[in-house]
Amino acid sequence: MFRNYLTRLIIPAFVVAALAMLAWWFFFNPVSNFTVSVPGMDNRRKGKASGGAPVKIGAEFKFFKNQDDLPGTRWPRFRGDDFDNICKEKIHLIDHWGKNGPVILWKLAVGDGHAAPAVYQGKVYLLDYDEVKKTDQLRCLSLATGEELWRRGYLVHLKRNHGLSRTIPAVSDKFVLTIGPRCQVMCVKRNNGDFLWGIDLEKEYSTEIPFWYTGQCPMLDHDTAIIATGGKALLIAVDCNTGKKVWETLNPRGWKMSHSSVMPMVFNGKKMYVYAAIGGVCGISAGGADRGRILWETGAFAPSVVAPSPVILDNGKVFITAGYGAGSALLRVSGGEGRYRVEILQMFKPQEGLASEQQTPIFSGGYLYGILPKDAGGLRNQLVCCKAGDCKNIVMSSGKTDRFGLGPYMMADGKLFILNDDGEMTIASFSPSRFTTLDKARIIDGQDSWGPMVITGGYLLMRDSKQMVCLDIKAR
């Protein structure tokens, strides 16, 4: 009887408690004391770096020693003088590493990343990142010894994202131009590192920083800096002497900055800049009354990630490729005098023809050479060749026993120098119909050896994610 009495009391109590909790759940506002997040209420000022401090581009400088220019060595920008990744110097280079192996002249510890150097008159220019001091640093080194001559930098906070620095400076007789991981552009005097000007693209153009930081390498066209910004403008031109804008290209479609670099093209006497943005590919007038104007564009091939740069072929053709399954496209520009057209000749997946995930293929003698990505089927990771006008027809491959990764490759002295992901270098002879491995050797025991190489004056510069080395590859 007592148990029945308790039951009659407990059950209604539970019902009342449940109803009270249900009412509280409906009517209680758990964020009633929260305030709306409005720009400016977090005490952050516009234009600040990710760490909170304003980026004072070029504010830091350190001098170590002098060195006079040494003529005879020149690789002044991404892909060299002619933007083709071919060293044309008449210096005979080794075919084999020799019984004692590679001749390493010097080694240099570098910040985590894939940034590669430029070389001018015996000096090496490298944009590096110091994780301890949290600074982008343009480092000037002696090519012969690796000794540091000076460095110019600025504080900017970065978080590791499969490497930090990725870009190559552009160098002329007067200037060095850089783009840092967070889109800070800096221009200095080449001979002594004196600061000239800087632009924070994220602040001034609302540039959206690419997912793996900036991969675009800047261009110097005589005394003019050419930068693809995305955001409020598509491209800008800046006078290196003054830092003043020469022109800006409108960006009506809102295309974004990619990891690809701007390439020059001359078609029917008209010079233009070709850029593969996130959103499409375009050609922009480089001079004349219409400089800075978009001459042609297409959004037919618009991958979400683009790392390789456009390859300018003959007769108005342009080859574009990208990774992560995007494949490639062969374009053809026609027309002239302000009325240009562009058409897609071929567009295909990696299993169907030449494609590349990270490195830019090489155009030589009417043929394209490149390393296929891992999703290219039976030819994956092989170096292959195709006719420039038919990129779906592979005419040569390195074979199943010679597969490579995402590392760089370049031509010099009629040979191919190919660097694998883990620091192994292959020397090969080649033609459109054959590939012959001459020798291979492990140069450094690192990983992610993806930064482009330099060959000039018989020196070879290469790096992995943490170390850069200089080799002597002159034939004896």
Image (cartoon, grey):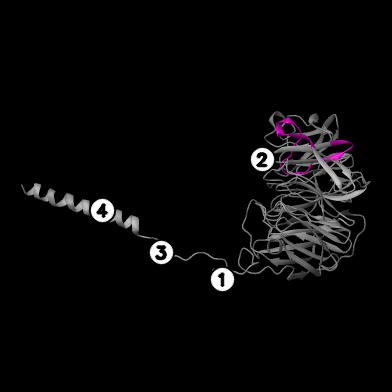
- The label on residue 19 is 4
Residue placed most toward the observer, 269 or 110: 269
Give the foreground label among 1 and 3. Answer: 3
Asked whether residue 129 is in view, the answer is yes
Identify the amino acid type marked 2.
Answer: Tyr
> At x 6% / y 49%, what residue is drawn?
2
Q: Earlier in the sequence, mark 3 or mark 2?
A: 3
State left or right for residue 338 relative to residue 62. right
Which class describes the residues within 10 Å of circle 2: few (<14), some (14-19), or many (20+)?
Answer: some
Residue 349 % position (x, y):
71, 34
Cα separation, mark 3 vs mark 2, equals: 45 Å
- Numbered badge on residue 43: 1
Magenta residues, start to end: 344-367
* Rendering quarter of residue 24: bottom left
Label 3, residues with CA under 10 Å away: few <14, some 14-19, many ≥20: few
Q: CA distance from mark 2 to mark 4?
A: 54 Å
Element under disc 2: loop
Identity, as a three-letter code, of the amino acid under mark 1: Asn
